[in-house]
Amino acid sequence: MTSVLQAQALGKKYGRRWALRDCTIDIPAGRVVGLVGPNGAGKTTLLKLAAGQLEPTSGAVTVLGGRPGHEPAQLAKVGFVAQGTPVYNTLTVADHLRIGARLNPRWDAPLALERVERLGLARGQQAGRLSGGQRAQLALTLGLAKRPELLILDEPVASLDPLARRAFLQELTQAAAEHALSVLLSSHLVSDLEQICDYVIVLAGSRVQVAGEVGRLLAGHPPLGLEDLVLAYMDGSAVAEVRR
Ligand SMILES: Nc1ncnc2c1ncn2[C@@H]1O[C@H](COP(=O)(O)OP(=O)(O)OP(=O)(O)O)[C@@H](O)[C@H]1O
């Protein structure tokens, strides 16, 4: 089975403090992977390492068989929507789509146009004058229309209203099924992840507590549901209990 992301004893230190330690995971392609963990657990650090925005302090990470962020072919295959779903405030919605088309060889212009129209984002509007949720939708449109093989999203639905959140998660599932897209996303809302993820990674205290297929994890811990299982792994004191 092809791996979309392999990390071997991956670690990242900021100054003298480890933000991520001894992370060894192997994520199969074609999955929608949920990354969960408490504040400061190292989720953003792991996602930035995978996107090539940070260099490891120790160990190694391979994404789609290559070193993250190191050559144009790699960059084209991996989409990254950073935490806070950033956009360029002084550029218009249309400018964002033009830049997306210029920078991305697999750019899906019809998808981008359909999406901004459906969401009511005026093409002439400066991104800085959109609402927080609309800015997020613009950043998500760029991520989807890039048509990457792997889309990495750091808390992508944090500023969306409940309906928009559900609709976006459905779009992700659909894109994963129809376009052979692998997805790695972090969220604090396990209920959201429960809807769409078939693979989950729990980080706590800078270390991977558990990683694996949702179905297999649930089968190994009856009668716990995903939320209770994830919370138990996030709470160090409960880990011994769930592992028993
Ligand atoms: N640029 C930085 N310089 C120094 N320390 C940092 C930096 N970025 C993150 N850290 C520290 O690394 C640890 C992990 O941070 P990270 O942002 O990866 O956590 P997270 O799981 O994404 O948290 P959250 O859920 O709050 O977004 C934290 O202790 C944080 O304070």
Image (tube, rainbow, N blue to C red):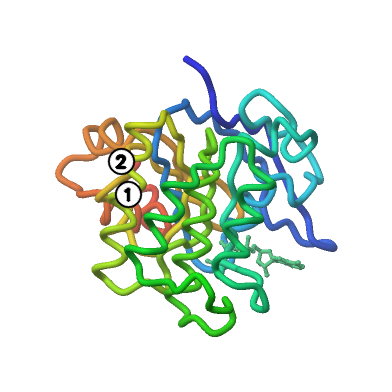
Residue located at (49% from left, 81% from top): 130
Q: Residues within 10 Å of mark 1 (few under 14, many from 20)?
A: few
Relative to residue 32, is residue 44 depicted above or below?
below
Residue located at (52% from left, 51% from top): 143
Relative to residue 153, is residue 210 depicted above or below?
above
The answer, for residue 235, to whether it is visible in the render is no
Q: Quadrant of the C terminus?
A: top left
The answer, for residue 99, to whether it is visible in the render is yes
The verdict on label 2 being within 8 Å of ligand 1 is no
Horizontal arrangement in the rendering, residue 99 relative to residue 114 (left or right)? right
Check disc 1 and report the residue beneath it.
171
Residue 223 percent across, percent down from the top left: 15, 44
Relative to residue 135, is residue 54 depicted above or below?
above
Residue 121 percent across, percent down from the top left: 42, 71
Return the residue found at the far front. Answer: 124
Q: Amino acid at mark 1?
A: Glu
Which of the pair 129/205 is nearer the observer?
Answer: 129
Locate residue 60: give its quadrant.
top right
Q: Callout 2: helix, strand or loop?
A: helix
Label 2 and label 1: CA atoms lie apart by 5 Å
Q: Residues within 10 Å of mark 2 (few under 14, many from 20)?
A: some
Check disc 2 and report the residue beneath it.
174
Q: Callout 1: helix, strand or loop?
A: helix
Return the residue found at the far right. Answer: 15
Return the residue found at the far left. Answer: 223
Horizontal arrangement in the rendering, residue 92 relative to residue 140 (left or right)? right
Query: Residue 123 — which label?
Result: none
Residue located at (61% from left, 48% from top): 101
Q: Amino acid at mark 2?
A: Gln
Which of the pair 64/26 is nearer the observer?
Answer: 64
Is label 2 in contact with label 1 (beta carbons under 8 Å)?
A: yes
